[in-house]
Image (cartoon, helix red, strand yellow):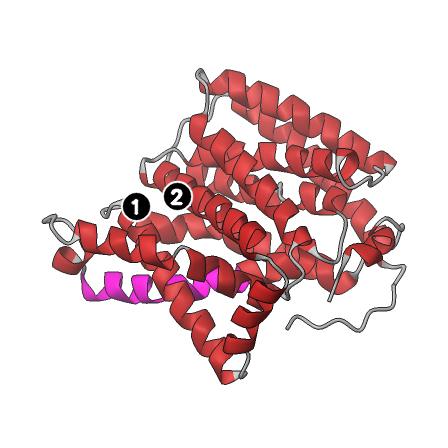
Amino acid sequence: MTSAATEPTRNTAAIDRRGAASGMTAYVVWGFLTVYWKALKEYSPVELIGYRVVLSVVLLVVIMSWRGRLLSLIADVRERRLTKPVALASIVLLVNWTSYVIVVSEGHVIEAALGYFISPLGAMLVGVKVLGEQLQPVQRLTALLGLSSVVVLTFSYGRVPVYALLIAASWTTYGYLKRQIPLSPIEGLTVETMVITVPAVGLIIWHLQYADSVVRTASAVDWILIAFLGVITAIPLMMFAYAAQRIPMTVIGPMQYSVPVINFLLGWLAYDETLTTSRVVGFSLVWIALVALTIDTIRRARRPIATNEELY
């Protein structure tokens, strides 16, 4: 398990290959989750979040119980006095989920993309200012290009992108908090979702009174999609948590650009959102950053570091 004592390792030139691969896979999955939420756009985003939390808890509790670690995990959280940081991570995660589902359901995929353009800058800022990490030359270029793209895209949007800012701030904060909680990825996610289970159930019950609620109107296909909300939520989050504990925030930050690029392509090609000249310029800047980052990451990943850590 990673602790503060291992932090210097994250600042070396080499990158944990499994951590990098896990983080990149998580971001690609998140990018394509837009399609999933679009398929459920007829339902209240808040109600869907309720199902997402509850089904995630069910899946994670089953996994932890099967491994015989559920009760010991709860006791461990109390003994280590982790209740406060876990609760904070839970709240921040809920804000991120809700903001993203709302903005996608309302047909503003480009704003969701903007949120994920801003969040890498926040992650890199936390890495440098809070964790004392050092930016590599290519990462400095990536940060500059990312900042430029955010300015251009914000101007293009024509108003304060509230949901984009919420997405960015909540995800950056969550990534930082995950590094402060000395639990394995699956343990951390289990207790985080357990904390917000009661309000999630309340959201589901509250929406039962409405004629367009999931219970009253969902088709067989809708129920299948809803049933897998726990799976599509838990798996990439565990992969992200695994990566966040093993590679620098200054590396994790730029990886997040894959999410807005995917959202951009979906919004433009699949959902017919307007593609203005300024948006093309903004996204072009980040594509250049992605190419530079990819080359640098591959080069550094060829310098293996010893690690015996496992996902669980």
Q: Is residue 156 magenta?
A: no
> Mark 1 highlights which residue?
46
Q: Is residue 284 left or right of residue 218?
A: right
Name the residue: 25% across, 60% down.
222
Secondary structure mostly taken by the magenta-highlighted segment of the chain: helix
Tell me where residue 66 appears, x and y as whole percent. 49, 84
Q: Which residues are magenta?
A: 219-236
Please report whichever mark, 1 or 2, sits nearer to the chain's N-terminal start: 1
Badge 2, how many Cα within 10 Å: few under 14, some, many 20+?
some
Residue 229: percent from the left, percent from the top? 38, 61
Horizontal relation, residue 97 to residue 207: left or right: right
The image shows residue 139 at horizontal and vertical percentages of 79, 37
**Rendered position, 246 above or below 11:** below
- For numbered disc 2, what is the local secondary structure? helix
Q: Which mark is residue 98?
A: 2
Labelled disc at residue 308: none
The quadrant in which residue 186 appears is bottom right
